[in-house]
Image (spheres, rainbow, N blue to C red):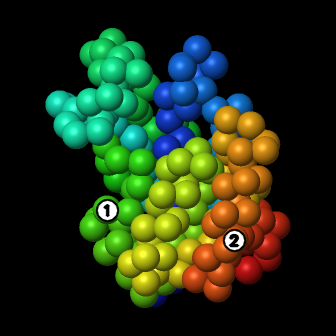
């Protein structure tokens, strides 16, 4: 089965400068993901983080820290970027987007990860996929974090999972 491009959480919650979860560089990342779409010829999926209807367990304290996310007026934050609205989408209330539906889409191929945030949802998804026996490529310059040091630290941590997880670049993916 061919590889699957997974664009993680390209949403207003991380792109809009007024959002408490704003991630600088997301606009650049979205443009790079657009460049990758033809390379994966319909083998793409966009994930979106959505808060749970009712927080439970450790999520209760999380949403005590971030109550805006549960406000019905914040619902607009959870849509996928309008440029990608026609793409297949998977929703999850967890940091890791490695849910059964995504696993089924990857099949015997590799998961090629892009998106935000490198140190959270990308990292958690990558490690869960590797733990599930799936080869992963993380496109370093098509991911973003709160700052460049955090981004680089997360990439360095993921690189320690080689050969199951490889760090690549947009240029390498476009040449493949």
Answer above or below: position of 17 versus 12.
Answer: above
Q: Which element carries disc 1, helix, strand or loop?
A: loop
Which label was assigned to residue 174?
A: none
Q: Could one spot residue 39 in this view of the protein?
A: no
Q: Which quarter of the picture shows residue 138?
A: bottom right
Image quadrant holding the N terminus, namely: bottom left
Q: CA distance from mark 1 to mark 2?
A: 22 Å
Q: What residue is drawn where x is 79% and y is 73%?
A: 172
The spot of residue 99 in percent (x, y) is 31, 62
Tag in front: 1 or 2: 2
The spot of residue 18 in percent (x, y) is 58, 14
Q: What residue is drawn where x is 39% and y is 41%?
A: 49
Looking at the image, residue 154 sits to the left or right of residue 40; the answer is right
Mark 1 touches mark 2? (CB < 8 Å):
no
Give the mark nearest the N terminus, 1 or 2: 1
Which label was assigned to residue 99?
A: 1
Q: What residue is drawn where x is 54% and y is 19%?
A: 19
The spot of residue 171 in percent (x, y) is 82, 67
Q: Which element carries disc 2, helix, strand or loop?
A: helix
Residue ID for mark 2:
159
């Amino acid at each position: 089965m061919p590889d699957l491009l997974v664009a993680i959480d390209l949403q207003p919650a991380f792109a809009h400068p007024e959002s408490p979860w704003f991630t600088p560089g997301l606009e650049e990342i979205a443009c790079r993901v657009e460049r990758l779409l033809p390379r994966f010829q319909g083998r793409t999926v966009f994930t979106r983080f959505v808060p749970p209807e009712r927080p439970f367990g450790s999520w209760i304290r999380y949403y005590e820290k971030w109550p805006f996310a549960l406000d019905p007026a914040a619902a607009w934050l959870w849509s996928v970027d309008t440029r990608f609205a026609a793409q297949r989408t998977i929703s999850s209330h967890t940091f890791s987007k490695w849910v059964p539906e995504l696993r089924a889409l990857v099949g015997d191929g590799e998961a090629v990860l892009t998106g935000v945030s490198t140190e959270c949802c990308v990292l958690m998804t990558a490690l869960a996929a590797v733990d599930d026996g799936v080869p992963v490529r993380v496109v370093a310059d098509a991911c973003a974090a709160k700052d460049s040091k955090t981004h680089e630290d997360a990439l360095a941590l993921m690189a320690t999972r080689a050969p199951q997880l490889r760090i690549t670049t947009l240029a390498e993916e476009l040449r493949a």
